[in-house]
């Protein structure tokens, strides 16, 4: 899959990795102001994850592309987003999905000795709508 346009996040790390993936999921936004989105419907979400760092692991990876995919795709593909515990107290809007993906990736990266950082998560919900989540500097510590 080739997307023509990726928003960039400036940084000074030596290496930057980007992983694209897509997944099918259903959701609904249970709020009176959400219009048709109150009712269950599905999307093919397109996701781009940006990870950067100065050091590589012993294989020469920032992190294996497959690990990133499995953390996100395995969890959400062909599921109802509202059923996940992280979306019980908040709605699975594009913004919240992007943030939750960032949290998942960040928690994994924190366990790695060479400390790569997730700088950006892009979630495209429809052909005309996407969100980018970029952590504050203090969230990356
Ligand atoms: N800020 C947000 N606004 C909306 C969200 C969201 O997650 N964050 N979500 C929705 C709906 O879930 C909907 O599925 C997507 O809406 P929209 O892009 O408006 O869909 P369309 O395909 O109808 O867009 P057009 O460009 O008008 O064709 C709504 N809003
Ligand atoms: Zn939707």
Image: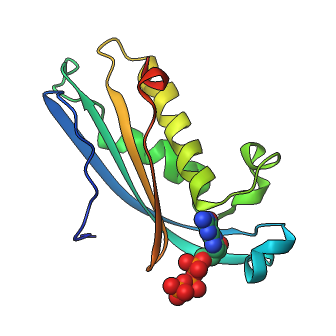
> Residue at the location (45% across, 17% down)?
111
Residue that extends furthest to the top in the rendered view of this protein:
113
Task: In the rendered view, tell whether residue 136 sits above or below residue 65.
Answer: above
Q: Number of callouts in the render?
A: 0
> Residue at the location (26% across, 69% down)?
3
Task: In the rendered view, tell whether residue 12 sits above or below residue 125.
Answer: above
Task: In the rendered view, tell whether residue 65 sits above or below residue 116.
Answer: below
Percent coordinates x, y for residue 135 in the rendering:
45, 35
**Coloured how?**
rainbow
Percent coordinates x, y for residue 9 in the rendering:
27, 44
Q: Is residue 114 left or right of residue 120?
A: left
Pick the residue in front: 44 or 103.
103
Q: Is residue 62 left or right of residue 126?
A: left
Q: Is residue 37 left or right of residue 103?
A: right
Pick the residue in front: 8 or 28.
8
Q: Is residue 8 visible?
A: yes
């Amino acid at each position: 899959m080739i997307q023509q346009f990726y928003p960039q996040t400036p940084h000074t790390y030596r290496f930057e990795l980007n992983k694209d993936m897509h997944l099918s999921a259903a959701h609904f936004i249970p709020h009176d102001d959400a219009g048709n989105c109150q009712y269950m419907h599905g999307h093919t979400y397109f996701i781009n994850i940006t990870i950067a760092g100065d050091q590589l692991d012993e294989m020469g990876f920032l992190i294996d592309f497959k690990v990133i995919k499995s953390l996100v795709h395995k969890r959400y593909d062909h599921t109802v987003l509202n059923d996940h515990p992280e979306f019980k107290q908040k709605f699975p809007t594009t913004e919240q999905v992007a943030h939750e993906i960032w949290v998942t990736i960040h928690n994994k990266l924190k366990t790695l000795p060479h400390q790569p950082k997730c700088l950006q998560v892009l979630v495209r919900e429809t052909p005309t709508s996407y969100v980018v989540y970029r952590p504050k500097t203090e969230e990356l510590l």
